[in-house]
Image (cartoon, grey):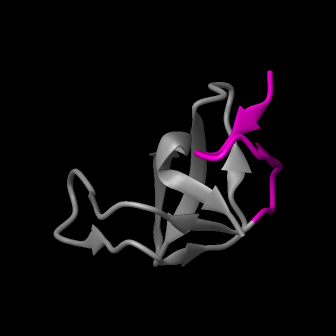
Amino acid sequence: MESKDSNGNILDSGDNVHIIKDLKIKGMSKTLKRGNIIKNIRLTNNPQEVECRIGKSRIVLKTQFLKKV
């Protein structure tokens, strides 16, 4: 299955994405602000989720909140 961003663009491993909505991360005091760029995403088995690295932590984000750069 293909992973698609909020606009319907197909995502691949290693792509860079923008966050389109402020996201509170469970277990962290950090909030990801709208407009932040996340580099080198990884696809997961679920087409609606991607894995990425924020600082030293690995987190999983829903593709509905991402836009391909």
Q: Quadrant of the N terminus?
A: top right
Residue at x 61% of width, y 58% of height: 67
Q: Residue at x 38, y 72 (%)?
A: 34
Where is 3 relative to 31, above or below?
above
- Where residue 20 sits, quadrant-wise, is bottom left
**In the image: residue 41, left or right of residue 27:** right
Q: Quadrant of the C terminus?
A: bottom right
Viewer-proximal residue among 57 and 35: 35
The x, y position of residue 12, in whole percent, is: 83, 49
Query: How many marks are shown on the rendered structure?
Result: 0
Residue 44: x %, y % from top left: 67, 35
* 44 over 59 or under it: above or below: above
- In depth, the one of 61 and 53 nearer the eye is 61
Question: Residue 45 vs residue 18: left or right?
Answer: right
Magenta-drawn segment? 1-15
Q: Position of residue 42 (x, y in %)?
A: 71, 51
Residue 15 in the image: above or below residue 12? below
Residue 27 placement (x, y as % from top left): 20, 54
Q: Residue at x 27, y 56 (%)?
A: 25
Which residue shows up at 36% across the image and 60% down it?
Answer: 21
Camera-side residue of 16 and 55: 16
Farthest residue to the top: give it. Answer: 1
Choose between 50 and 23: the one closer to the eye: 23
Q: In the drawing, does residue 27 fall left or right of residue 45?
A: left
51 drawn magenta: no
In terms of secondary structure, what is the magenta stretch mainly?
Answer: loop
